[in-house]
Amino acid sequence: MKLDDFLGQDTEWLRGTGPNSHIVMSSRTRLARNIDKYPFSHWANRKQSEEILSMVKAAADATNFLKNALFLRLKDLSEVDRFFLVERHLMSPEHAENVEYKALIVDPKEIVSIMVNEEDHLRIQVLQSGYNLMECWRILDEIDTELSKRLPFAYSAKYGYLTACPTNTGTGLRGSVMLHLPALVFAAQIDKVLQATAKLLLNIRGLYGEGTEASDNIFQVSNQVSMGIAEEDIVDNIERIINQIIAREEAARRAIMLKNKQALVDRISRAHGTLRNAHIITSSETIALLSAIRLGIDLGIVKNLDRRMANELLILTQPAHLQKLEGRILTANERDIKRADLIREKLK
Amino acid sequence: MLCDICGKSEATVHLTEIINDKVSNLHLCEECAREKGQEMEEHFGLSDLLAGLADFGTTVEPEATLEALKCNSCGFSYLDFKKIGRLGCGDCYDSFKNKIAPLLKRIHGADKHVGKVPLMVGKTVKDTKDLHDLKMKLDKTIQLEEFEEAARLRDKIRELEKKDKKGNDKGNK
């Protein structure tokens, strides 16, 4: 298995299957862990950082879920390859910067990945298509337990797992769900939903996590609090709130189909037309139009396409993916042309 | 030159803004500059927020006091934490406990962990690290064909692993 093999396969979070996948695009859980007696990543010296890398690699190699995983030293990868991994949600944008002692361990199915020497020594992530948060946690829990047989984690009886930033202390668990909420945006109800969600101590972010804006109908919702509440309860709390949001989005979709169907059909058909005919198109316009297409597929308005195709286009049209497909660095203008070519070809 | 925002008053303040690598120059009158300044103060990061949460109370401690407050294990100072919003090592939680415990309470609404406990805590933690170090050394000695030393290390590893197994069995009962 090589990094380039990922290009030909559907990444887990975009398979477009799983429970409630018409609204929930993917579910993700991650644990922050550090190795006892070692300074946190930003404060560790060269020797300590190298030791952490080799300890984590050895532990992962001995773990059932990760024995066939790829171990990638990020300094050995090109910038395009690093952003390719970010676009596939296998690592954070921060992990693609200052890469000297950073590594990524990723299983061939792209479900499990471990960022090594990110903000914490280990950021272990499990990603699933659709609404599967509890399942993600169960897998993650098992991997964490296996790793902990070989890695002594920094832990205090009082504070729990010790992390570089106090916002992750305790369980070190962050659960997040990526939602596609076009009808709530269309019906101008989204602000109300987001405000209510924020009051319940959940974070809302954009497509690529921390520091990115929620845009084009795609939102990531995650827990803020990681201490004083057990892992299952954190997951359960998120699920309860997500269930409400799903119900609201479904109601908004029904309402639009009843009252405003022509306007919606018009918007979706225009999106389809633009994608099929454009010769120059930016990444953000593509995401916006694909969001409309996705809604059209969900509501039976767009008939000759499936969700999987919409998802595939969503990822293949990202900058690093386009450059991987083309096998060379492209300027922004070249990418806009290539992107349009690719979309016209796929939607023919 | 007239102000770029209101276009009425004389521009006396000149600002350079860099957003997404794009440089733009702004020429503003005093009144518009003040408004712009307020807008810019809103762009602050997580470390500012955390520092704000940690330093409640009325007295502001001088930087020298915060710099002198250092972690015994890793030498990281509390001032460093205030600046970057990250701690130096696990022991920092203890070294700065008077400040960290209230901070955790403010962030999480709790300062006690509930939930998972790792398999290895306390003494076995050290043994595991020793074991790892020994195995690394063993690999090296084999590569260097120092077989006598390798045999010694192998015995030591066996001894530690036996101890580890006993400890685990006890833990499972």
Image (spheres, rainbow, N blue to C red):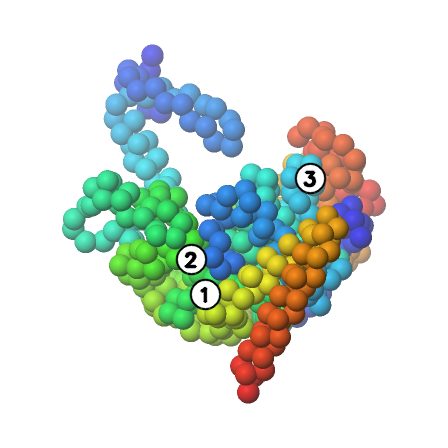
Disc with the residue nearer the chain's start (1 vs 3): 3
Q: What's the amino acid at mark 1?
A: Tyr
Residue A220 in percent (x, y) is at 54, 56
Marks 1 and 3 close (CB-CB < 8 Å): no
Q: Classify mark 1: residues with Cα within 10 Å, few (<14), some (14-19) or many (20+).
A: many
| Mark 3 vs mark 2: in front | 2
> Which is in the foreground here, disc 1 or disc 3?
1
Label 1, label 3: how far apart the Cα atoms are: 32 Å
Quadrant of the frame with the C terminus of chain A: top right
Secondary structure under badge 1? strand
Q: Is residue B18 visible?
A: yes
Residue under pointer 3? A76
- Looking at the image, which is closer to me, A103 or A249? A103
Q: Secondary structure at mark 2?
A: loop
Please provide percent x and percent y for residue A125: 60, 60
Question: In the current view of this chain or complex, which residue is farthest to the front?
Answer: B148
Point out the residue furthest to the top here.
B1
Rounded to the nearest whole Å, what is the CA distance between mark 3 and mark 2? 30 Å
Please give the residue where the numbered disc 1 appears in the rendered image: A155
Badge 2: how crowded within 10 Å, few (<14), some, or many (20+)?
Answer: many
Specify the quadrant of the image occupied by residue A110: bottom right
> Any mark on residue B90, and which?
2
Q: Residue type at mark 2?
A: Gly
Q: Determine contact: label 2, label 1, CB under 8 Å.
A: yes
Task: Determine the chain carrying the residue at label 3.
Answer: A
